[in-house]
Image: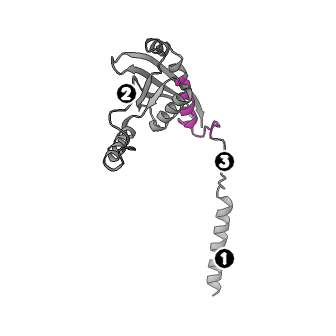
Amino acid sequence: MKRSIKVMAIIAFVAGFSACIAPQRTVARIDTNSQTDLSGRWNDTDSRLTADAIIDQILGDKWLPRFENAHNGKRPVMIVGLINNKSHEHIDAEMFIKDIEKAIIRNGSVRLVQAGDKRSQLRGERDDQNQFSSKETAKKWGQEMGADYMLQGTINSIVDSYDNRSAVTYQIDLELTDLETNEIVWMGDKKIKKFIKN
């Protein structure tokens, strides 16, 4: 009996001691627009700031007034295509694409249409409506808005490191192409450079 009490006491002591030296985790809610850099890798702040800067470049360039002048003030229709991650780390390109689409809609100078899987899903819903909904409420085929331009691009990075220090440069290159003629009407980039010391 004494032996089991000693064993229990030792286990309790070890458990208590472990709890004292284990790091305590704290969690705090912060503003989603606040800048947080913990690892030095690409993050939500980089994505949002890059999207806003790129859209300001695109929509402030000469191609837009040229299009509006040639089409009696009509807003062009844009589709966001693939943005390929060619950087050294995993970057969620879908999140970046969404940030670009939000910036386009907020600006309001161009119209935006769905791309890829979401467009296919919409077409599937339209097909279901034409089979199962009343004629009065079913949406018609052949009424989609065709895009005038497609935005595409890449995310690249360069890492320079020595000892406990690293400099990481991200370069986001985008181009806007006329879908009818394949003419590139705009090219731009945004660079982000981070210095990381361990």
State whether residue 195 is above or below residue 2. Answer: above
Label 3 neighbourhood size at 10 Å, few (<14), some (14-19), many (20+)? few
Q: Earlier in the sequence, mark 3 or mark 2?
A: 3
Task: Identify which amino acid the numbered label 2 is placed on.
Answer: Gly
**Residue at x 64%, y 68% (from the top left corner):** 15
**Residue at x 49%, y 34% (from the top left corner):** 96
Task: Identify which amino acid the numbered label 3 is placed on.
Answer: Arg
Question: Judging from the image, what secondary structure is the residue with disc 3 in?
Answer: loop
State whether residue 23 is above or below residue 123. Answer: below
Residue 1 bears which disc, if any?
none
Pair 3/2: label in front: 2
Residue 9 bears which disc, if any?
1
**Could you give the CA–CA distance between mark 1 and mark 3, rounded to whole angstroms?**
39 Å
Label 1 neighbourhood size at 10 Å, few (<14), some (14-19), many (20+)? few
Whether residue 12 is in magenta: the answer is: no
Name the spot of residue 43 as percent of width and height, x first: 55, 37
Task: Identify which amino acid the numbered label 1 is placed on.
Answer: Ala
Q: Please identify the quarter of the rendering in which residue 88 is found.
A: top left
Location of mark 2 (residue): 146
Q: Nearer the viewer, residue 86 or 159?
A: 86
Q: Are marks 2 and 1 in contact (CB under 8 Å)?
A: no
Task: Give the side of residue 141 with respect to residue 91, left or right.
Answer: left
Q: Earlier in the sequence, mark 1 or mark 3?
A: 1
Q: Please identify the quarter of the rendering in which residue 25 is found.
A: bottom right
Whether residue 50 is in magenta: the answer is: yes
**Could you give the CA–CA distance between mark 3 and mark 2, rounded to whole angstroms?**
42 Å
Locate the N terminus by quadrant: bottom right
* Bounds of the magenta segment: 32-55
Location of mark 3 (residue): 29
Pair 1/3: label in front: 3
